[in-house]
Image (cartoon, rainbow, N blue to C red):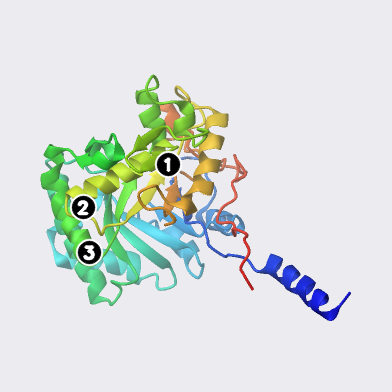
Amino acid sequence: MSSMASLLVIFGLLATLILDTAESQVGVCYGMLGNNLPSAAQVISLYNSNNIKRMRLYDPNQAALQALSGTDIEVMVGIPNSDLQYVAASRDNSFDWVWRNIMSYPDVKFRYIAVGNEVKPSDGTLAPLVHPALTNIREVVSFYGLKDQIKVSTSIDTSMIGVSYPPSQGAFRDDARAYIDPIIGFLVAIDAPLLVNIYPYFSYTGNPTQISLAYATFTSPGTVVQDGANGYQNLFDAIVDAMYSALERAGGSSVEIVISETGWPSAGAFAATFDNARTYYTNMVAHAPKGTPKRPGRAIETYLFAMFDENNKEPELEKNFGVFYPNQQAKYNLNFNSIQKGFEAI
């Protein structure tokens, strides 16, 4: 073999070893509403051993935060709805909350503070609290010099969308605008994403005659919905892009979306089967790096709901969203945050 041919062979071998290290953006929500769940230390060890790099905590659980200290897991920590009154009431209260739950854990990699979860615009008690709570918490985060490290946002569900079909016509309900518009303005001003809980399962089961199971579980063989130049092969993308269209109509074209929850139950209700759940979660993990037709190639930061089946939840289907069993055994053998292999030109 000539020296030139040998060099070509060597370069070819090197090319197969050079990988595109584009990383998936998938985290998992750590719910705790079960009486048979492992300890926080065991859970954090389970995240690490499965290469799960991001976690959503619904409240600043002290045992979980202690176990997270010194790890590389990035954390979305929630201010539960029950605490909104406290942090909205004054900046001093917000300083107290941030000091106890953020600053007291300097070795935890906080990524987001989620101020409230799925507050309904019609809730006359909670809805007026979200914007002042967001503002107070953001001011405290800025005071501590963490505004570029920790983004402050709130988590909504898709019931705020009044028009979702086709995705390009997505719009918030008129009766939600007084609630969501100031929040969108806040997010635009601080360059923070909107956190959205998205469940194709509920869209499918609410209208199974019009929506196919394949469309809801990422298994359609081709385009199901053509919307101008954009073709939709799965319901998840259609919902996300409807939300982007709604944001654009409300002055939030610069706001990114983070999927703060998505999942599929494995038992307890119509279409809640092990096979359907495994198909949804497996395909969701594979799809997250690809973006949507409206924003192709832009990985969708996504948090699967949830880490475990939680037996203290109701109704029955709510007990069956786990991607692990309480005994720490994987339900679906998901390939979290795997390196996507590819070649680079030499």
Question: From the viewer's perspective, is 244 left or right of 54?
Answer: left
The first of marks 2 and 3 along the sequence is 2
Q: CA distance from mark 2 to mark 3?
A: 11 Å
Cβ–Cβ below 8 Å for labels 2 and 1? Answer: no
Q: Amino acid at mark 2?
A: Leu
In percent of the image, x 43 and y 68: which residue is there?
108
Q: Secondary structure at mark 2?
A: helix
In the displayed structure, would residue 314 be above or below residue 155? above
Q: Amino acid at mark 3?
A: Ile
Q: Position of residue 187 (x, y in %)?
A: 22, 60
Question: From the viewer's perspective, is 241 left or right of 266?
Answer: left
Which quarter shows the C terminus? bottom right
Question: From the viewer's perspective, is 161 left or right of 53?
Answer: left
Q: Which residue is mark 1?
A: 33
The first of marks 2 and 1 along the sequence is 1
- Which quadrant of the view contains residue 14? bottom right
In percent of the image, x 49 and y 37: which residue is there?
218
Q: Which residue is mark 2?
A: 84
Q: Secondary structure at mark 3?
A: helix
Of residues 303 and 280, the one nearer the viewer is: 280
Q: Position of residue 148 (x, y in %)?
A: 31, 72
Is the residue marked by circle 1 packed among few (<14), some (14-19), or many (20+) residues within 10 Å? Answer: some
Q: Amino acid at mark 1?
A: Leu
The numbered mark at residue 137 is 3
- Which quadrant of the view contains residue 76? bottom left
Of all residues, the one furthest to the top in this rendering is 209
Q: Nearer the viewer, mark 2 or mark 3?
A: 3
In the displayed structure, would residue 60 be above or below residue 217? below
